[in-house]
Image: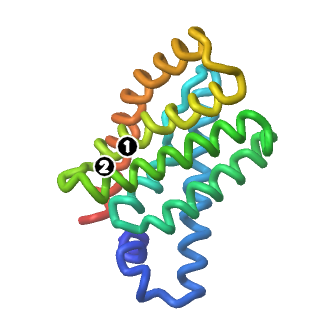
Amino acid sequence: MELLNDIKNYEKLSPEQKNILLAFLIAISSLLSLIDTIITKPFIVKIGLANIVTLILINENRFKIAISVMLARVFISSIFSGTIFSLAFLLSLSGGVFSIIFSIIAKMFIKKATLIGISVIGSFFHIVGQGLLIILIFGFTNSNVFIISIFCLISIATGILTGIFASFVYRENNQ
């Protein structure tokens, strides 16, 4: 597929092609985030479908692009959901920053890291980032620690699910 080839050969693209690719990846990621919000509306927990794009970029060692896509997606999704600069936005941003940092670290230092493994690490640290923000704002209470712990457990399942989706998309487009 051309999209994956463009990601793999990013250095060879013209500046205009790089901008188009980045805009396209941000659009896909933002759309997946919106779909994720619609699908999981009755629940508190999102699956993390938007991270499929980020995972593929990290898997291809396109760390700067992955960071750009994540940051843009958080801002765009918050604008469309009407939560820009709210607590929900700050939670999304803190989770995204922690997630991408630890996903990149995992990719760099774990030789046999798979998309599923990176996804689980990212999902778990997304909750850690959000949990730290909650504790900073609302204090270190037993109820906060309990809820954060529950979400950390759930993050493993959502990380596996997102990693499976990312692996499927990557495998289908890498043939």
Outermost residue to the left? 112
Q: In this view of the protein, which residue sits in the foreground, 70 or 173?
A: 70
Badge 1: how crowded within 10 Å, few (<14), some, or many (20+)?
A: many
Q: Secondary structure at mark 1?
A: helix
Query: Is residue 85 toward the left or the right of residue 103 in the image?
Result: right
When the figure is inspected, residue 9 is found, relative to residue 170, above or below; the finding is below
Q: Residue at x 67, y 20 (%)?
A: 139
Q: Quadrant of residue 121?
A: top left
Give residue 52's position: percent from left, percent from top: 44, 50
Q: Confirm whether residue 168 shows in the render.
A: no
Q: Residue at x 79, y 44 (%)?
A: 84
What residue would you read off at disc 2?
Answer: 115
Q: Is residue 47 left or right of residue 76?
A: left
Callout 2 amino acid: Leu
- Asked whether disc 2 touches disc 1, contact meaning CB atoms under 8 Å apart, the reply is yes
Q: Position of residue 148 (x, y in %)?
A: 52, 21
Q: Is any part of residue 105 visible from this angle?
A: yes
Which mark identifies residue 104? none
Query: Residue drawn 54% across and 37% down?
Result: 129
- Give the residue pinned by disc 1: 119
Coloration mode: rainbow
Say if 148 sits above or below 28 in the image. Answer: above
Q: Disc 1 marks which amino acid?
A: Ser
Tell me which residue sits at (39%, 59%) in the image: 58
Q: Return the x and y of residue 116 as percentages of the image width and height.
A: 30, 43
Seen in the picture, residue 96 relative to 171 is either above or below; the reply is above
